Image (tube, rainbow, N blue to C red):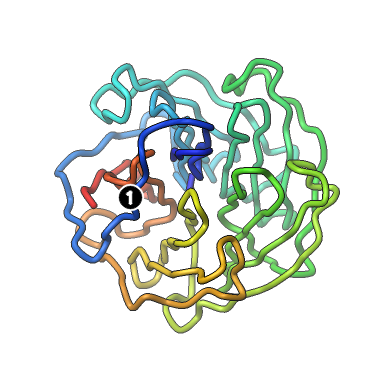
Amino acid sequence: MSISRLMQMGAAGVSSGPAWTNPDIANASYDSVSGSVSTDTSAAYDLFFKPDGTKVYITDNTPDEINEYNLTTAWDLSTLSYVQNFDASTQDTNLSGAYFKPDGTKMYLTGAGSDGVYEYDLSTAWDISTATHNQTLSVTSQESTPRAIYFKPDGTKMFITGQTGDEINEYSLSTAWDISTATHSHVESISSEETSPQGLFLSPNGDKLYVVGAVNKDVFQYTLSTAWDTSTMSYDSVSFDLSSQEGTPLGVSFKNDGSKMYIVGLTNNIYQYST
């Protein structure tokens, strides 16, 4: 998940930036670096980085809000400071995933309370205090417990992890970034690896997919032989154990060059790893 990107960096997204190298999570290592959000967050479910690493957003399942933080030094968790929150409880009472359009003018949230995707417009980019609810897409026909959400950099595809179905759901959007034009195109089971998939992240060119699981407490890596097409997805037999840091990992993100991985979970800490 949310994150950063090259052309739009996944959980972040941008049209320019450092060259991305696919992470080597099989040989990842904990940097002994973390940032606490426990003062402002009770149940951290997902994280999303602004493409330049100067902001991170954390969804809080209790209450149902998203919290905004500044990093005075990009990607440096020791410089994390709370800014503000946005209450999403009117839309959903079991909030989980978050994603922002690359220019920061749209925010997308998911939740299992109403099994929906919620689209918001931000009149000031990246400032969640200016967010207004635009529209809702029900995904209940595909998944009763949607968790993380992710978009293709051009906004024409959307991906959602399903905790109940142990799967990745793929949608096509005929109008970019407009969830009212989304149609379900494919579902891919990952139950052989994880029975409670949560966080989600795709590489900038759509050839790698990463999922965090709350049961096995791992990050799992997949290859898409056709970019952005989950019907061509296969497990790489590569995973990374997070249990030494986080007992319930729920969100995953990467630095915009792929060299760092960030995990958040119910300890309400963000953990940093070298990849």
Q: Residues within 10 Å of mark 1 (few under 14, many from 20)?
A: few
Residue reaching furthest to the bottom = 192
Total labels: the figure holds: 1
Residue identified by numbered label 1: 21
Q: Nearer the viewer, residue 131 or 183?
A: 183
The quarter of the picture where residue 256 lies is top left
Judged left or right of residue 89, residue 273 is left
Q: Amino acid at mark 1?
A: Thr
Q: SS class of the residue under badge 1? A: loop
Question: Vertically, is 199 above or below 140?
Answer: above
Question: Vertically, is 26 above or below 44?
Answer: below
Question: Vertically, is 190 above or below 168?
Answer: below
Expressed as whole percent of the image width and height from the top left, the position of residue 235 reads 42, 77
Q: Nearer the viewer, residue 258 or 263?
A: 258
Expressed as whole percent of the image width and height from the top left, the position of residue 78 reads 23, 26
Q: Nearer the viewer, residue 240 or 221?
A: 221
Q: Residue at x 65, y 34 (%)?
A: 107
Q: Residue at x 18, y 51 (%)?
A: 30
Judged left or right of residue 157, residue 230 is left
Expressed as whole percent of the image width and height from the top left, the position of residue 35 reads 28, 34
Expressed as whole percent of the image width and height from the top left, the position of residue 135 reads 82, 40
Judged left or right of residue 3, residue 169 is right
The quarter of the picture where residue 40 lies is top left
Q: Nearer the viewer, residue 97 or 255?
A: 255
Q: Residue at x 56, y 39 (%)?
A: 63
